[in-house]
Image (cartoon, grey):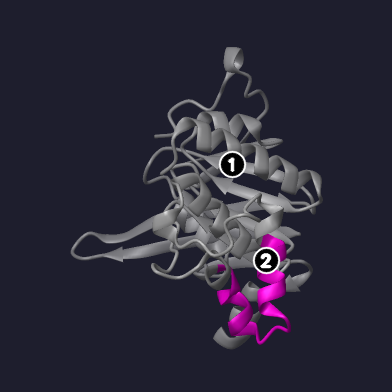
Amino acid sequence: MIQLRGICKSYARPSEGALQVRKNIDLDINDGEYVAIVGPSGSGKSTLMNILGLLDTPDSGEYTLSGEAVAGLSSTKLAKLRNSKIGFVFQQFHLLPRTTAIENVEIPLIYSNADNPEERAVEALKKVGLGERLKHTPEELSGGQQQRVAIARALVTDPDLILADEPTGNLDKASGEDLMDLFEKLNDDGRTIVVITHDENLARRAKRVVRIDDGRLSELRDVTPEKSQIGDVA
């Protein structure tokens, strides 16, 4: 599904020169994988997420998503590809206040002019266990329930890939465990999941863990608590 070859990305810093945060990265993620990406703050995790999600473009290298080369696509084509192929889940839920769960989940369908948006939103909310909270607004929902609404919004376009950036960051332990269970179920159903996380427990629940440090990637072969190589992910 995802193939990165020689990806580099740098940002200009006033009076300090360029800051290189991605360095000739190669990464393959196959259909149906569940991958956690870990690493210390400032290591380039968010930059990698933005590149994978077509929210940012690399300075050099090649990115192929579901067999389609991304380089050179117009902003309109990138937006269409992003809307059809990728669902996003963030640490901040980004739900519209005073707007029902159904209406929040419908938003991606409005941009794509999809048929039957309300019906599809209801189906997505039922998938994440919120069939009894369809008309509730964010302030009427717990943090864990709000994150489930955000996941339903990510699922409603039936994307091949779910990208999650620190999805347990604003959740209590019990809600975080529920979210991990949900990600595993979605992966078991065939969805590709890529999670950027500081949460070691979430990383260990993934089927593959990649560490990023100083802009470089390495595979972690053993992430059991006794032999964890995750190390400092804060």
Q: Give, as a single range, the part of the protein colored magenta.
A: 105-124
Does residue 224 sit above or below 155 in this rendering?
Answer: above
Q: Which residue does the image show at 45% across and 64% down from the upper left?
A: 95
Q: Quadrant of the N terminus?
A: bottom right
Q: Quadrant of residue 152?
A: bottom right
Disc 2 to disc 1, how far (Cα)?
19 Å
Q: Quadrant of residue 208?
A: top right
Type of amino acid under label 1:
Leu
Residue on which the image places disc 1: 179
Image check: 98 left or right of 200?
Answer: left
**Mark 2: secondary structure:** helix
Does residue 188 sit above or below 130 in this rendering?
Answer: above
Q: Which residue does the image show at 39% across and 67% down from the upper left?
A: 97
Is residue 69 rendered magenta in the image?
A: no
Residue 122 - label: 2
Does residue 232 sit above or below 53 in this rendering?
Answer: above
Report crowding for label 1: few under 14, some 14 to 19, many 20 or more residues within 10 A (C-alpha): many
- Disc 2 or disc 1, which is closer to the eye? 2
Mark 2 or mark 1, which has the lower sequence index? 2
Type of amino acid under label 2:
Val
